[in-house]
Image (cartoon, rainbow, N blue to C red):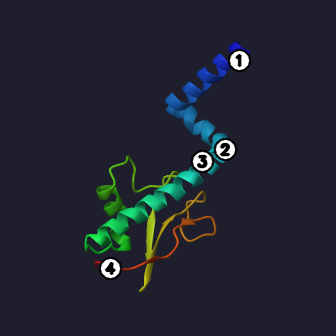
């Protein structure tokens, strides 16, 4: 049993550390990671909403959707802060009265049913153009 465990740990280490093996293994591993990625994306969407609330509390306008990814990358110091777990930039959708922060989800296409989107956030200030 311990030899099998050692072999599995060695195999996992090789897949993680060797880019060519990682690329070949990802199609098989990705479905198992999606629940964790969805949980992580929900948490990041909530974190980004909090960042926007802080900006508004300080009297600063929220960024416009075109500059949103750059804003998140500047404001949040986590590695790849502007990208969801699937590698797609988080997005901002703005209406006259509210805004939404979203992740494109596992299909990596924004505005589809699998998106992970915040509840509507009431706007306190005008959007910067």
User: Which of the pair 18/1 is nearer the observer?
Assistant: 1
Verify CB contact (< 8 Å) between mark 3 and mark 2: no
Position of 15 with respect to 125 (left or right) is right
* Quadrant including the N terminus: top right
Query: Sequence order check: which comes first, mark 4 or mark 3?
Result: 3
Residue tagged 2 = 32
Task: Single out the mark in the foreground, 3 or 2.
Answer: 3
How far apart marks 4 and 1 lie (CA) works out to 57 Å
Mark 1 residue crowding within 10 angstroms, few (<14) / some (14–19) / many (20+): few
Q: Are marks 2 and 4 in contact (CB under 8 Å)?
A: no
Q: Disc 1 and disc 2: Cα gap in Å?
A: 21 Å
Residue shown at 50%/76% (left/top)?
A: 120
Q: Which residue is mark 4?
A: 127
Q: Which mark is residue 4?
A: 1
Q: Quadrant of the C terminus?
A: bottom left
Q: Is tag 4's residue or tag 1's residue first in the polypeptide sequence? A: 1
Position of residue 16 measured from the top left corner of the image (x, y, whole percent): 53, 31
User: Which sits in the foreground, 90 or 43?
Assistant: 43
Left or right: 47 in relation to 23:
left
């Amino acid at each position: 049993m311990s030899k099998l465990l050692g072999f599995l740990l060695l195999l996992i280490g090789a897949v993680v550390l060797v880019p060519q093996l990682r690329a070949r293994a990802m199609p098989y591993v990705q479905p198992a990671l999606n629940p964790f990625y969805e949980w992580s994306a929900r948490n990041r969407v909530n974190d980004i909403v909090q960042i926007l609330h802080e900006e508004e509390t300080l009297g600063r306008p929220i960024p416009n959707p075109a500059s949103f990814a750059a804003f998140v990358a500047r404001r949040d110091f986590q590695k790849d802060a502007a990208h969801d777990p699937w590698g797609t930039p988080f997005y901002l959708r703005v209406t006259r009265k509210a805004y939404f922060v979203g992740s494109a989800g596992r299909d990596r296409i924004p505005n589809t049913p699998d998106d992970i989107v915040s509840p509507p956030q009431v706007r306190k200030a005008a959007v910067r153009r």
